[in-house]
Image: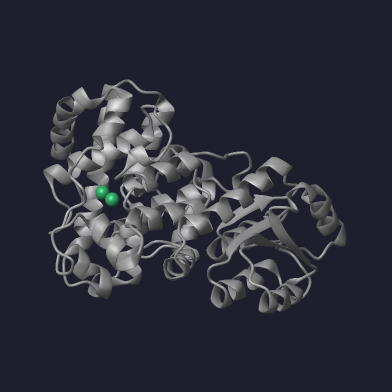
Amino acid sequence: MKRVMFVDDEPNVLQGLQRMLRPKREDWEMYFAKGGEEALNLLQNAPIDVIITDMRMPGMDGATLLEKVSKLYPTVVRIVLSGYSDDVNILRSVVNSHQFLAKPCDYDTLIATLNRATWLQDYLNNPFLQRLTSNTSSLPSHPSLYYEIVLMLEKPECTIKQIVEKISADIGMSAKILQLVNSAYFGNSKHITSLVQAVNLIGLNTVKSLVLSLHVFSGFNNSKLKSNLINNLWNHSLLTAKVADRIARMEQLDRKIIEEAYSASLLHDVGMLILLNNLPQEYEPLLMNQMLPDIPIEEAEEVFFGASHADVGAYLMGLWGLPESMMQAIAYHHTPSRQNSREFNGIALVHAANVLTNEAHPIMPRSETVRFDEEYLDGLGLRGKTDEWRKECRCAEQDETI
Ligand SMILES: [Fe+2]
Ligand SMILES: [Fe+2]
């Protein structure tokens, strides 16, 4: 049974939640704390899977509580439920929380959020990787792209179009912007997968605050690595996004699928970035084929860590509340037949684009699987398409990379 804790200084809110969630008593053990201190005391005595807290509370506020929880109990999923809409404080809470819900929160949204949070803990059932991933509050950017974005934002004449172009080439910033825009902070803007729409919705001023004053982003520290893996990872991710975009347009798929395919492809190997940033000494030799040689990256990771970069990436993007479809595309990009959907959607596009991109340019001395999931493509009637898609990959390669 999963354990969920609610924290709010208003007894009425806690009673309301208790009433509303009565039907879930069989699924979750629920705890209700009247403030931060009480929550921390309860946590000392009982392990909790998910904490949902108000922000503005007397004594210890929600942001402070979540900061303490992230340090003391890093595997706990941290969610804010607040009516508080002051920009700086919300952005501050974004650093230590995985998701943000607005009060009043309807039953379906609350249940869906909690169901996903508890499901994710079973999905990546590896406490070491859970700890490492859930305390990742932002991902580093490509060093030179980060520098270009900072310079651009410091100029008063900087336009949103220029910023969108740069952010859409960066894995770390794209992921964080999609987390923000899919949180309740931006009202009803759930399920946003388009980066253009995401940057337009959050606005240039918020991007400036995140980058220039709150320093939510930073450039990847290249001195952690002996090789040039960071450039390879960015070029591979960007090329995969461009290939998926070209295939989706050529196949005249829906606009929503085209948008999602680009973003999900850009982020499909976000798990590699998480591992490279947190465990450079262990992960770099694995990518360089110096350990467990000559098997695809994702298989070597399964042996070494007990989970692959696809699992780690999908876990963090799920924690951050990115749309389910994007999470699935990231989770199953090597093995799409392991999931149930049999539609020509983002999952198929990310898979195909990733295979083609690895075929053309292995990311590192060790590449990912360069095999199409034939059973899956057969099920979609797409097996005969791969040569045509290969041509799209060659065209995308001629576009400039970083
Ligand atoms: Fe991958
Ligand atoms: Fe990849």
Work out whether residue 296 or residue 64 is closer to the camera in this orientation and state it.
296
Q: Where, quadrant-wise, is the N terminus in this rendering?
A: bottom right
Q: Residue at x 18, y 44 (%)?
A: 370
Going by the image, does 163 lie left or right of 237?
Answer: right
For the rendered model, the colour scheme is one colour
Going by the image, does 351 lie left or right of 204?
Answer: left
Q: Quadrant of residue 154?
A: bottom left
Q: Residue at x 21, y 48 (%)?
A: 369
Q: Is residue 106 visible?
A: no
Q: Is residue 349 visible?
A: yes
Going by the image, does 271 lie left or right of 19?
Answer: left
Q: Residue at x 26, y 68 (%)?
A: 283
Q: Residue 365: x, y in percent?
A: 12, 59
Q: Is residue 31 above or below residue 205?
A: below
Q: Is residue 89 above or below residue 23?
A: below
Q: Residue 67: x, y in percent?
A: 59, 72
Q: Residue at x 17, y 69 (%)?
A: 291
Q: Residue 239: x, y in percent?
A: 22, 43
Going by the image, does 6 lie left or right of 244?
Answer: right
Number of marks in picture? 0
Q: Residue 166: x, y in percent?
A: 33, 48
Work out whether residue 16 or residue 126 is closer to the camera in this orientation and state it.
126
